[in-house]
Image: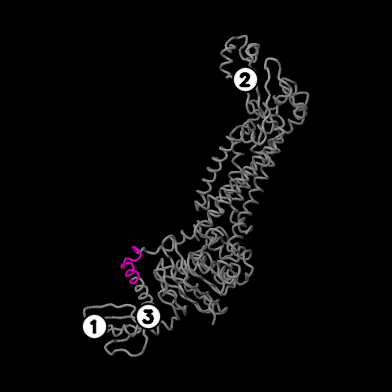
Amino acid sequence: MTWVTFRRFRFELVTLTVALAALAAWLIGTGLQHYAAFDVPYVGPISAAACARQIPQPQPNSECYNILTTYLNQFQGDGGNPLLSMLLSNTLHFLIALVPALVGAMLGGPLIARELERGTFRLVWAQGITRGRWLWGSVIAATLATIALVGAITLVVTWWSAPLDQIVGHFSGGFEMEGLVPLAYALFALALGIALGLIVRSSVPALFITLLGFFLVRSLITQLATQLYAYFMPPLTITYDSSIAVPPTGPQMRDWVTSSGFVDHFGDPVSQDLINGICGANDPTTAGNPTSACVHAHGWLYTVTWQPDSRFWAYQGIESAIYLALALAVLAVAIWWVRRRPV
Amino acid sequence: MSNALETAQLGRRYGRVWALQDCTLALPAGRIVALVGPNGAGKTTFLHLAVGLLRPTAGSVSVFGHSPQREPLTVLPRVGFVAQDHPLYKEFTVNDHLTLGRKLNRRWDEAYAVSRLNQFGIPLTRAAGKLSGGQQAQVALALGMAKRPELALLDEPLASLDPLARRDFLRALMDVAVADGLTVVLSSHLITDLERVCDYLVVLSHSRVALIGDIEEIVRTHKRLVGPRTDHTAVAAVHNVIEESHTARQTTLLVRVNGHIFDPAWEIADVTLEDIVLAYMGQARASVSEASGGGMGGPWRSPLDDEKHDEERDESEVTR
């Protein structure tokens, strides 16, 4: 069945391979450029790579911090390579995030729907194999193809964004484009496609409904992500008097700050507007620096909650597990839905 | 001689409508069987039950003594099935289809399939979707026959073919059937398509078996009686009256004869197989109307056409 499935999806597989190869070539081309700038002393006396490896991580306004900021700006800002700055923009972020969903939906949506739509199940079910083998053979072949395609592009994206991740951290860099989660997204989209294809029984609508459904689920889970992660691994938090100094035990350059703000003695949040109003954001002497003696005088403290960059793989594991569990659940529902019907 | 296909009270219902009902029959091995009935009579349902695409709602079906549902790996290799409209993967070349057959069947005679296809000048490297309807039918038949089945089930194989392609198709089929002692079931809504090649007949009408038997015997035992417009209860007492029609002065009866003596008032004539089949279909319709007229089961619903059956079936039969 593997051969049959690959042959049935030859057009989709070739199209996706060509498109992903083009994307990979582009990423490798631009990646080589910014790797070159990363590894040599390019924007200062020390290379950005050396700065990024510093332990403890560079503090704001240190030399290394500035080198890294310059490096980032060079590739993100107006003065940098316009292609790269677009690459780092949300548009490309979205495109790369679309890849797993697209691969899953293109292979999953028509997997069974097209057999039903075109009547070819009557050809294939009359061959000398059981229907169970037909189903599992198709599902396994599509899963293998999905893993190969998404795995390959994810490797390239992970390599491409490694310098960026070493500066801004894995969470802000490319959490959803790197590591395991793209594979989990793709497998979920695949399972969703198979299930919706069974219901819609028409391959093109199945593809689009799958994409829609996938992004609905993803945006829901993204909304819940902070709470979900906090549930599995509570974030770190620190509360300090901001008029004195940032304690070294606070969040580092690469950590993911999930929330920050002022609180009063009781730990209740104090709004920035209130602080600005009382401590005179309009007063030229204190403007732009609300973390002043005025704040200290009122006894307001600054509190930061964050997830350390070192938890990247743990969270990759959690996020992947969520999507893989969803994928299995959807697949099981699809099979159940089919069997439940009077035959 | 043993039977290739047997059914007992076989029935299949879609929702509340029976597509096939109370079907008990035995098809002897080695015969070329015409499965005839109007659209929606249950032909496709019958064939799909026989190949295991459908699960019976009632009764049972066995192919060479095995259940297609419970023992697919015993039944499938022995059955060559060509579905209605001979579905093929349009983007696959003919060669790809042969590879599919080779990979999905333990028993597979590729040389045989290739020689058949060459015989009809079908290019093996062309995509199936670019072949003519007749060529596609030949490819589908070649795929079914390369399994070297003992039973071939062909659903409306002639429907999309022009007369020349029909002749070629039937000729090709007969070559195999005769050479291999194959049992063949061909469905059609027209008996005239199949009359030349078939020796056994099953007429389905309104989801029930209306007539079954050896074609020669059926033709021999059915006669048309034409006589004066009189009461014909005497005839009906001895012979089965299948169809009667009356004009002001005469009565015409189509009967299945049960004896040899006829009232000299009746003029006896042979009937064509087509007339016999039509009469049985008409009789089934009449009896169905009568039954529903009795107020037994609510208004009689027209049987679903084959298309609709397919849709119903797809929904319920996607996997197992």
Asked which quadrant contains residue A88, the reply is top right
| Tag in front: 3 or 1 | 1
User: Which contiguous range is marked in magenta?
Assistant: B286-299
Distance between the alpha carbons at the discs numbered 3 and 1: 25 Å
Position above or below: A288 against B46: above
Asked which quadrant contains residue B98, the reply is bottom right
Crowding at dot 3, Cα within 10 Å, few <14 / some 14-19 / many 20+, comes out as: some
Q: Are marks 1 and 2 on the same chain?
A: no
Residue at 58% over, 67% down? B72
Decide: marks 1, 2 in contact (CB < 8 A)? no
Q: Chain of mark 1?
A: B
Q: Which mark identifies residue A266? A: 2
Position above or below: B176 against A269: below
Q: Which mark identifies residue B230? A: 1
Question: Where does residue B173 sit, x and y in percent of width and height?
Answer: 52, 74
Q: Residue furthest left?
A: B248
Residue at 62% over, 15% down? A290
Residue at 45% over, 69% down? B43
Distance between the alpha carbons at the discs numbered 2 and 3: 102 Å
Question: Is residue A152 found left or right of A9 in the rendered image?
Answer: right
Question: Is residue A277 found left or right of A181 in the rendered image?
Answer: left
Q: Residue B296 in magenta?
A: yes
| Tag in front: 1 or 2 | 2
Mark 1: which amino acid? Thr
Crowding at dot 2, Cα within 10 Å, few <14 / some 14-19 / many 20+, comes out as: few
Q: Which residue is mark 3?
A: B272
Coloured how? one colour
Question: Is residue A315 found left or right of B141 in the rendered image?
Answer: right
Q: Are marks 3 and 1 on the same chain?
A: yes
Q: Chain of mark 3?
A: B
Question: Is residue A63 found left or right of B209 in the rendered image?
Answer: right
